[in-house]
Amino acid sequence: EERDKFHSSSNPLSSGIGLQHTQLAALASGTDVSLWQEGSLVIFQAVQPSSCALPSVDRNDQEDEDADGVDLSAFPSGLHICCIDDTPLSLRTLEVGLKQNARAAKVDTYGQNGPADVPRFMKHAPQTDIIIFDNHLDWPGRHTSGVDLLRTIKQGGFQGLLVIRSGNTSDEDILRYREAGCHCVLGKETPIKQAAEIIKRAYLRLRRPPPPPARPPPPWRLPEPLFSSPEL
């Protein structure tokens, strides 16, 4: 048959789901895609940005590298990262992108099996170095709040980096994530390479040792008189 000449994509990000795959891949790479029809002609257009320096969602992560004193070359390789999302392609994007751009030794993904993954995620995630949460976990018949999961893990004493990756990134949303204990907020439209840079910078800031305590001032003393008064 004619269609037997064509094979499925070998791209590691491919899920074989057509236009949905194209849209999510475009969001991950920062590409502007359009599809329209003119008569019998169907036109697809993809335009990549001229620069990868797209603005970060996290206001605290927009700081210049020199300004905040973070040296990204100090980011350690071999960290263990755990992610939960309701979209298999988003999970695959994170897995491949973080291994390539953050030198992660292991990226565990949860959510592709639906809400049954949540208990396993909550048990395993606190044993890792970085946890990335989708804010709205919408599976058929069930909604779970990623912020609630983050808050529970934070209250359990987790000392690593907590990241929210969401399509909801208004100032009010970011404040709510921060109040729950989140260290870093990423928009889902942020290209994965830039997202990895933001995560690395946030991790290094979290691990930066606190400044030494200020030395207490010397005890206050009355000034010595310049001249001694003669004895009467």
Image (spheres, grey):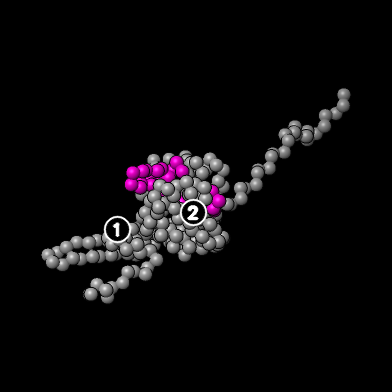
Does dot 1 land on a helix, a strand or a loop? helix
**Residue at position x 44%, y 60% in the image:** 95
Q: Which residues are magenta?
A: 126-149
**Residue that badge 2 annotates:** 82
Mark 2: which amino acid? Cys
Mark 1: which amino acid? Gln
Residues 148 and 52: in front is: 148
Q: Residue 103, how many percent across, how many down?
A: 51, 63
Give above or below for 202 relative to 155. below
Q: Which mark is residue 20?
A: 1
Say few, some or many: other residues with alpha carbon within 10 Å of mark 1 (under 14 / 14 to 19 / 20 or more).
few
**Residue at position x 27%, y 60% in the image:** 19
**Residue at position x 54%, y 53% in the image:** 129
Q: Which mark is residue 154?
A: none
First along the sequence among labels 1 and 2:
1
Q: Is residue 12 magenta?
A: no
